[in-house]
Image (tube, rainbow, N blue to C red):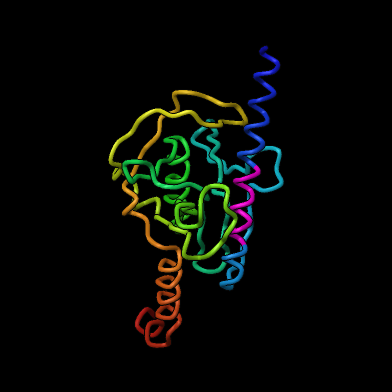
Amino acid sequence: MASLAGSIQCANNAKDRALGIYWERCFCDIAADHGFVLTALQIGRGESATWHSKTGKQWSTYVLPDITVWTCPGQHHEIKHKNPTSHESFGLEQYRFAALLAFAQVTQQDVLYTIHNHDLSGGREARGNALEHWLTANILELDRRWTFSGKTSSWVNGQRRDGIPIYYWSSSMWQPLGEYWAAMARRRIVADSPLWNHAGG
């Protein structure tokens, strides 16, 4: 019986990961269509891509976001395919949020929790991919602004675990991904203007 349960668990994990990879690729398609240069950091790996820091003799290891957009000034996206909860919230495991927050503080670049909201695309199993289905929120803006926390079941290192601490935020804290990219384009135009460069120099 334990062997059967383990086989089911592995199958469910594989199915969930395949769905996640599909939507990571869909994000890459959308971003590339908008002229961004990027790397999918987690696709095609047996283990998660990580970053490391050292304090004294103690090393710390954190999981990287799913997608890095290299186009200046840089973006790092944690990708999820989900819909809001019944209380109109989006959740994220506390350990993942802590890793993303630390990465944002170190890089001083935008680290974003980016969601393909399948309520907008016809359901969890639908495969339509349009910019209008995508929402994003800056991790720094989510810090200490969760509406409540709780416990959930989640995959951790390929194992299904119960009692994983999770934060929830109001879905109103997310903006359309297209709006975020439009605002970034405006910032780049200002930063590249001769007047701005003269004033900054």
Residue 26 shown left or right of residue 199 in the figure: right
Q: Is residue 199 above or below residue 28?
A: below
Spot occupied by residue 190 in the image (x, y as percentages of width and height):
40, 80
Q: Is residue 96 left or right of residue 160?
A: left
Foreground residue among 16 and 106: 16
Measured as percent of width and height from the top left, residue 31 is found at: 57, 66
- Quick one: which residue is furthest to the front in this view? 122
* Residue nearest the viewer, comparing 53 with 71: 71
- Asked which quadrant contains residue 49, the reply is top right
Magenta span contains residue 24: yes
Residue 83: percent from left, percent from top: 44, 47
Q: Residue furthest bottom?
A: 194
Name the residue at 53% across, 47% down.
124
Residue 107, placed above or below residue 35: above
Majority secondary structure of magenta residues? helix
The stretch of residues the image draws in magenta is 18-28
